[in-house]
Amino acid sequence: MIIMKSKYYFLYIILGLCFANISCKKYLDVPPVNIVNEGDLFSNSKGMQLYLSRMYSQMPFEDFKYSPARQFFDDWLVTPGTNEGSSLGRDAGEAMTSEGWARNGAYWVRAFNLLRDANNLLEKLPSYKANFSDEEYNHYIGEAYFTRAMVFYALAKRYGGIPLVTSLLQYPEKDAAQLEVPRATEEETWDQVLADYDMAIANLNEASPVKGYANKYVALGFKSEAMLFAGSVAKYNRITGFGQKTGVRVIGFDPATATAASKKYFSEAYKAANTIIKSGKYSLYKKKWSAGDKEAQYQNMVDMFFDASSPENIYTKDYKWPDLAHGYDSYNIPRQLMGGNGYSAGNCPTLDFVELFDGIAKNPDGTIKVLDNNGKYLLFDKPTDIFADAEPRLRANVIFAGDVFKGAVMDVRRGIYTGSVAGGIAPLRVVNGATNYTIGGPQTYNQTDAYTATGAFAGHKSLFLSQNGTTHEVVTLPDGTKMNGGGLNGPFGTSDLTAAFTGFMVRKWLDPNLPQELVLEGRSEQSFILMRYAEILLNAAEAASELALAGAASPDGDDLQQVMYDAITNIRERAGADPLTGMSELAGEQGLQVIRRERRKELGFENKILWDIRRWRTQHSDMLNGFTQSDGAYYRGLYPFYSSVADKWFFDAGFEEARKRFRITEQEYYFMIPGDEVTKSPVIDQQPGR
Amino acid sequence: MKTILYNIISLIILSGCAKIDNYAEPGETLKGTVVDAATGDPVLTDQGSEGTRIRMRELSWTASAPENLDFFCMKEGIFQNTKVFKGHYNVRVDGAFIPIVRVDTNGDTLVDESKTLDISGVTELEFKVQPFLKLEWQGTPTVENGKVTATVVVTRGVSPEDFKTKIEPMGNYSDDFLNVTDVRLFVSQVPYVGYREWDNRYTTIIEYPGDSFEAHLGEPITITTQGTIPSGRTVFIRAAARINYATENIKRHNYNEALRVDIP
């Protein structure tokens, strides 16, 4: 026994010696021969491609791997549009008030990795200048500035003032405590964004040397977008304050400088956009477009998202299965065409979005006309009739009931009404005889008198619904055929939201040629257009309008009114929308609203509009169906019903059944800084007041 | 052999965690009230981030920059935190009243009426503040057809001159700050009714553009709830109003006390 024990002690001593010895000798301290080092990377364009690939893989692009709920680098449940008011989804659809449940962590933390790569390139590449031609060298320097601008821009629009790390922090050579960089003011931050974009524009090539790289016009495009953001914040932001640790104004602008800053940024946004316009290098996509032909105009706007040779594309994020693919089709496909993963209809456009467009019969208050002058439903022969004259651009965005997608007629039907149609059908949202279309009214049609056979319907149930995709109430039609209450795409009320629960489905970005068996997560490979010419026109128009409102002179001598007019006219013509009545329509504050509305119609589902309503600071305050988002607001849906007696269709408009509640308070325009980053640093400030 | 393996494993594991968290658990209590400096009445509030916030910072903790320890006032204007570490603290309150810590546009402190104190045992505090508005019920609410009608009188808790004297040095002053923007009759099925707890089917919000409320100051305002509250329900109602001025970046409401109303 004793011998055994001493054997153990011997073992422990050996073990202890092993641990003790590891760190003493330096014989492992040699440059690794099997690892590519900077000298290799910066030796030729092939090496640089590796370096840039690593940078681009971390770039904060809001593409098919971005959602407001989970932020960057996460392609699960990507349903662009669901936080900006354009659409709602089962798993999405609320105001973006934080970085949600970002599995990859807050961008605050992630950003600094890429920032270091950019600063490293800026500091080290000059020593290797001899390895490159001047053109190559300048382009790589431009890439570094472009990257830094993108990082600072992505941070600034989320957090306001940020630590402006513009040189390579010497870590681990220096102690981490010496390398702490406090947050700058928001104004200094936007000035840095501007300076970095300008350096990128000055250095980048006219054309991307490799597809996917930036170029001068890409940088100009993002500059115009970023400066529009900065100018809007300087003008419309109302919350500001000082950091607790540093006393620096980390969010908002100093009232003394805000007006001048706003003019400067709008002017920069305008100049950048107008430079692209005047270059003549890009144009609106009109390959299939034909004047007066709505069908051609519609098809043109569908095709433009899939044509790699589109002259409208300034910058795209490209995907290729199996190396880099996404799941847009899987999450957003109409339920009727659901793929193998079981996701569908994650992106249901709201009626509020649809009502922005032209070619729809509307009431004086701008809402869609579904009732006749006696307050009874308008009856249609086919469900598509209500949108027969709709603006082609709307059809390219939204799939309606009865529309054709991938060769199939989209079956969208909330229910079948079997009651009498003599004297017309009265609005359905009635409980115990009281018609109620307010928020206090019935949430779903399952609660209405026609369904529960109460009130005027006592003894004769007149509404038949489906509770989900498999549980149906079946109606025998007058001709003897049987029909399910709900359509193949629903809607099914609140019990199953993997359906068209607002009555609409998204069409934008959905690949019309992807076979159903490939509608899978991580299988789609269409490109995401990060920057297109239409946005440049809208940026130019908005910046011009803001400059005119501020009484500023045109920064480049062009007539601001003419720039606005041309931009909106061209976009509307391509979209098949009603033309402007004249230049006066774009004048003043009212004109600015016309331009903003055009933006919401053109750029929906492209991860742009949510940032727009945030920079306009209207997200919390715009009146939306009787409420503001600061009090909690709801969107509306349009529900198709079939009248079996009349063999006609009618539509009920009102709050959508899921009652997705959007709520944001003003201070949430700035995301919180991650708490542990604030705690562990002596200089990083939390947002003032939070 | 197994024992050796376990011994080696435990040796490796234990070598990493020599420090045990033996810090005494927090047991001190901070409690108090936020009262109207003029009348001594508690300043009623919402229970949540749009209500009165108590912010403690432990100054005796020097290992890192003091963190903000926030909690919120109860609706009666009283606060209590029974899990406080013994130590030296700075305590401030922010709500729908003149900020007790005021800074100018350069971030320099103009006035600091926050309290710095040792917290040990049960420490009581009273903050005397100047609420922007005061709301009082007039008469008792009546119920008809599932709708509650109540009358409320809104007056200023701080005079416009006093407000201007204190707020203007903070910079970017506008006379619009004093405008009453909205009066609400909040309805909820729980007594904690307020901005974070209201039933939007019944609650009434009246917005007042510009300075249009000026004429209603001190005058009875009669508000009726929306929709129809089903018979047999018990609801709690509360009136709230706010001015066009944000403290700590939030425009907060002043309140009157919650009333229970039984719908016959």
Image (spheres, coloured by chain):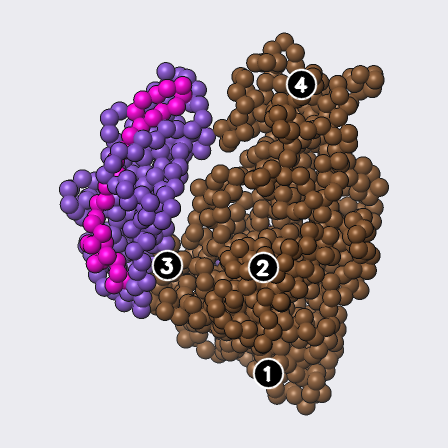
Labels 4, 2: one chain: yes
Marks 2 & 1, CB-CB < 8 Å contact: no
Residue found 58% across the figure and 25% down from its top: A429
Amino acid type of the residue that numbered disc 2 sits on in the rendered structure: Ser
On whether residue B152 falls in the magenta region, the answer is yes
Task: Using a 10 Å C-alpha cutoff, classify the residue at mark 1 as few (fewer than 14 neighbours), some (14 to 19) or many (20 or more).
Answer: some
Mark nearer the viewer, 4 or 1: 4
Q: Does A587 sit left or right of A418 as displayed?
A: left
Q: CA distance from mark 3 to mark 4?
A: 62 Å
Q: Secondary structure at mark 4?
A: loop
Q: CA distance from mark 2 to mark 1?
A: 54 Å
Give the numbered dot on residue A423. Answer: 4
- The amino acid type of the residue labelled 3 equals Pro
Residue type highlighted by circle 1: Lys
Q: Nearer the viewer, mark 3 or mark 2?
A: 2
- In the image, the chain rendered in purple is B
A107 in the magenta segment: no
Precedes in sequence: disc 3 or disc 1:
1
The residue indicated by pointer 3 is A688
Q: Which residue is mark 1?
A: A124
**Chain painted in brown in the figure:** A
Chain of the residue under label 2: A
Q: CA distance from mark 3 to mark 1?
A: 37 Å
Magenta part of the chain: B141-170
Crowding at dot 2, Cα within 10 Å, few <14 / some 14-19 / many 20+, comes out as few
